[in-house]
Amino acid sequence: MTKRYAPATERNRESILQVLREYLPEQGTVLEIAAGTGQHAAFFSRHLEPRFWLPTDMGAASLASIDSWREEVSSSNLLRSRELDVRDAVWPVEHALPAPISAVVNINMVHISPWECCTALFSGAARLLPSYGVVFMYGPFKCEGQHTAASNARFDSQLRSENPEWGVRDLEAVTDVAIACGFERRAAIEMPANNLSLVYGRTAGDAANASRPDAG
Ligand SMILES: C[S@@+](CC[C@H](N)C(=O)[O-])C[C@H]1O[C@@H](n2cnc3c(N)ncnc32)[C@H](O)[C@@H]1O
């Protein structure tokens, strides 16, 4: 069976959609890193037209699942999935897009991957996004080194026992990486089930130097 199903996506998608509506640029292509099953892509693309939605992930099984959700919804703005490991030095996603990439969306990845994936996320976004570009992240985060809920602390221990390189990340550490890559935090929004939505935009100085995807 190629089509995968993650129940959590149906619980969090409405509240995430509200934040995306508020913060995503109104046009362009949204690049989703770590799209997982493809359920979010199928849902968000339907609700966020006229933006295009480009779902990516690692491995054939994920891509097959994303594309089988895509076939089911048949939204004309939902693009075929592409393979992308966020750590790739070049993200092979800019070619043959109907509109330049205006946002990078990353949901529930940085705690289930090594820390280098978080740094790679912002380096890649810095390479790709125009001055008005936005990075959106969602998941559990610690604030000032403290878990925001006992359930997040338990989840963190479980993740670390599964893989010592995984774990719930510090909001401030993520923001430090963002700043080092030329972004500033625009919002940190409390979400249901002790998660946060984080929104980063380019800092003014960096925005002036940002290479525009349509600048050739
Ligand atoms: C918990 S799932 C989240 C999937 C989806 N965003 C969601 O919320 O349902 C974590 C995802 O991160 C992806 N992932 C892990 N490491 C990655 C990497 N280096 N580059 C791209 N995706 C990665 C996995 O393949 C998986 O699909």
Image (tube, helix red, strand yellow):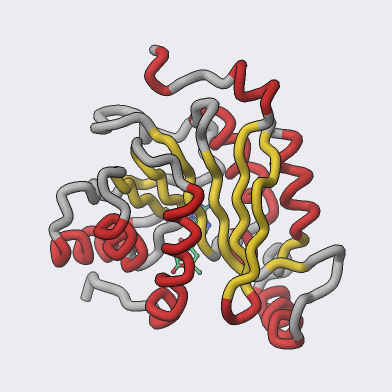
Q: Is residue 145 above or below residue 162?
A: above
Residue at the extreme front: 22
| Relative to 68, 53 lies left or right | right
Q: What is the quadrant of the C terminus in the image?
A: top left
What residue is drawn where x is 72% and y is 85%?
A: 154
Q: What number of labels is visible?
A: 0
Q: What is the quadrant of the N terminus in the image?
A: bottom left
Rendered location of residue 126, percent (x, y): 58, 31
Q: Is residue 23 above or below residue 74?
A: above
Q: Is residue 179 above or below residue 162?
A: above
Q: Is 6 or 196 nearer to us in this picture?
A: 196
Rendered location of residue 187, percent (x, y): 65, 53
What residue is drawn where x is 22% and y is 66%?
A: 69
| Relative to 101, 63 lies left or right | left
Rendered location of residue 106, percent (x, y): 51, 54
| Relative to 174, 113 lies left or right | left
Rendered location of residue 100, percent (x, y): 35, 29
Residue at the extreme top: 216
- Where residue 155 sits, quadrant-wise, is bottom right
Residue at the extreme right: 145
What residue is drawn where x is 22% and y is 58%?
A: 67
Q: Is residue 194 above or below residue 19?
A: below
What residue is drawn where x is 54% and y is 51%?
A: 136
